[in-house]
Image (spheres, helix red, strand yellow):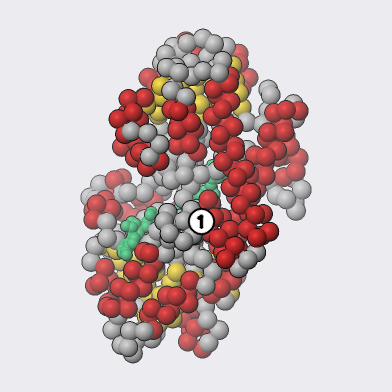
């Protein structure tokens, strides 16, 4: 029998967009996305579809097409579990901040709560799909919880990690490089796997749907993120050599990227990578390696994070040293707060670290981001607990107008690669700044020649141009 009802627990950056795409592509399947967070569900249900809680280009159109037809958002978790044949778990799995594994292991508290809730509600057989990114062998823990209910209900656990990148989620979901599904090598496991393959095959060519064991699938997700982040740290490590030697990182990236074995993607030097996944997933990989006593493996991957931390600190320190070793009381405009363009997500954004560093140096910061709210900026800084909340508010202001943010500033730091930054009237920005006026381009997106012709001092990543 084919699947008629899907439920997804977790209406976040993955659950929302992923389920909206399944609903769009499979009008014959009812998809219910549930969450404990009432405000989030209310936002997904907002009559004005532009108010959905996740900003992604094209997402509001996908939601508008399916919502109310076969896509539903609800806080009634139990009813959705009860009715679904397939349950995706797409809850958060952040780095654990207490107890054993603090600072490295994934906190699986929310995963376990989901498993226990499913176990207590389910009255008939279900397929449980791990959509969250999980440490390898988590499926056995989920299975353990589910099979000890004594209810006679049978569960199959599949791993189906998500590879979408924020900012391009709709594109990535519409036309994925691959969909990965791991299942047990038993007749029941293979039948469950086939059912999930059939759902994706409604729009994804079958040769792009890879099937593996559950363990390979779980580990492949951590591996993919580790490899991607490693490329960014590798190019960022080289950017520092470029700044000492007058080589240019963009030229180096082009020169190596044309080697088809290396490839040209993910070689953009920057102020550092951010986002909710890279750091968390590598730390998790490090923790797994350590827990098996594989210390060399753990140290190897940890270096990717150490390099990334260095790149963020190096960028912030350069601002201070360039401004004559003091930014005390100086206005510095930060353009961009999101961890990359085309998203309102700020988790682990390098902007947070750079701002914190400059606030320690007693700078006066002016932040502008086209999609991030004032409340979010302050929440991100308060979360660090590095100073009093009042101090964050006294020394950092959030602006709705980039020109006002830059007015009277000594320097501007570009921290997100938003396209709109390239089209600003840089002459007028220059005229309203203190001199010498410096731009620190943490994303290498601005036209250096144009800025220099206007009169700016420019510092970019990985070049002395
Ligand atoms: P998120 O924090 O945006 O969303 C998770 C949601 O789950 C929250 O709204 C939370 O309220 C809800 N939730 C938690 N426990 C719940 C419970 N017991 N019942 C109901 N709702 C519950 O997280 P996200 O960014 O969507 O990430 C989810 C998972 O997907 C993580 O494991 C992450 O590593 C993985 N992932 C994320 C991305 C990404 O780009 N953000 C990409 C691939 C994979
Ligand atoms: C990442 C993975 O790409 C995605 O497959 C996975 O599902 C979730 O984690 P995401 O974090 O949303 O996606 O964005 P991504 O495009 O990977 O960028 C991550 C960070 O690396 C951003 O801060 C980005 O600015 C930075 N980056 C990326 C660079 O600094 N240089 C690059 O060349 C590429």
Quarter that holds the N terminus: bottom left
For mark 1, give the secondary structure. Answer: loop
Q: What residue is at 51 percent from the left and 66 percent from the top? A: 135
Q: Does residue 113 appear in the picture of this structure?
A: yes
Q: What residue is at 53 percent from the left and 59 percent from the top? A: 284
Q: Position of residue 160 (x, y in %)?
A: 49, 68
Q: Is residue 123 above or below residue 46?
A: below
The residue pinned by badge 1 equals 104
Q: Position of residue 444 (x, y in %)?
A: 59, 31
Q: Does residue 397 appear in the picture of this structure?
A: no
Left or right side of 7 for 331: right
Q: Where is residue 56 in the image (x, y as percent from the top left)?
A: 41, 47
Q: Is residue 132 above or below residue 122?
A: above
In which quarter of the view is residue 257 placed? top right
Q: What residue is at 30 percent from the left and 87 percent from the top? A: 151
Query: 328 or 458, which lies in front?
Result: 328
Q: What residue is at 53 percent from the left and 51 percent from the top? A: 278
Crowd around label 1: few <14 · some 14–19 · many ≥20 (10 Å): many
Q: In this view, does 49 lie above or below 138?
A: above
């Amino acid at each position: 029998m084919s699947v008629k009802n899907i439920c997804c627990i977790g209406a976040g950056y993955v659950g929302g967009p992923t389920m909206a795409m399944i609903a769009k592509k499979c009008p014959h399947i009812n998809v219910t996305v549930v969450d404990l967070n009432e405000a989030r569900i209310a936002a997904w249900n907002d009559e004005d579809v532009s108010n959905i809680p996740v900003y992604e280009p094209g997402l509001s159109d996908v939601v508008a097409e399916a919502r109310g037809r076969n896509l539903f958002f609800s806080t009634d978790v139990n009813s959705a579990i009860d009715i679904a044949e397939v349950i995706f778990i797409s809850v958060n799995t952040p780095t654990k901040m207490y107890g054993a594994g603090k600072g490295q292991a994934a906190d699986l508290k929310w995963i376990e709560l989901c498993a226990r809730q499913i176990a207590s509600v389910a009255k008939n057989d279900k397929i449980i799909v791990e959509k969250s990114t999980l440490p390898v062998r988590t499926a056995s823990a989920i299975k353990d919880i589910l099979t000890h209910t004594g209810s006679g209900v049978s569960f199959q656990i599949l791993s189906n990690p998500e590879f979408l990148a924020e900012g391009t989620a709709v594109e990535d979901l519409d036309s994925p490089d691959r969909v990965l599904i791991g299942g047990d090598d038993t007749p029941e496991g293979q039948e469950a796997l086939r059912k999930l393959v059939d759902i994706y095959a409604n729009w994804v060519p079958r040769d792009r749907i890879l099937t593996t064991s559950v363990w390979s699938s779980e580990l492949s997700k951590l591996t993919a993120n580790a490899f991607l982040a490693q490329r960014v740290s590798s190019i960022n490590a080289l950017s520092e050599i470029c700044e000492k030697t007058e080589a240019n990182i963009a030229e180096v990236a082009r020169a190596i990227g044309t080697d088809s074995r290396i490839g040209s993607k993910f070689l953009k030097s920057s102020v550092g990578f951010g986002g909710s996944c890279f750091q968390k997933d590598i730390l998790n990989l490090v923790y797994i390696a350590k827990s098996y006593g594989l210390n060399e493996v753990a140290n190897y991957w940890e270096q990717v994070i150490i390099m990334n931390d260095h790149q963020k600190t190096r960028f912030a320190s350069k601002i201070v040293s360039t401004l004559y070793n003091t930014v005390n009381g100086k206005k510095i405009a930060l353009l961009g707060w999101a961890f990359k363009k085309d998203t309102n997500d700020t988790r682990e954004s390098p902007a947070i670290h750079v701002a914190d560093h400059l606030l320690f140096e007693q700078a006066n910061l002016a932040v502008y981001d086209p999609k991030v709210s004032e409340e979010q900026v302050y929440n991100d800084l308060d979360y660090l607990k590095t100073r009093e909340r009042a101090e964050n508010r006294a020394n950092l202001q959030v602006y709705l107008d980039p020109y006002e943010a830059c007015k009277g500033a000594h320097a501007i730091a570009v921290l997100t690669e938003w396209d709109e930054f390239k089209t600003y009237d840089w002459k007028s920005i220059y005229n309203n700044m203190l001199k010498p006026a410096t731009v620190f381009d943490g994303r290498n997106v601005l036209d250096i020649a144009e800025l220099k012709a206007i009169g700016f001092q420019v510092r970019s990543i990985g070049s002395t141009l």
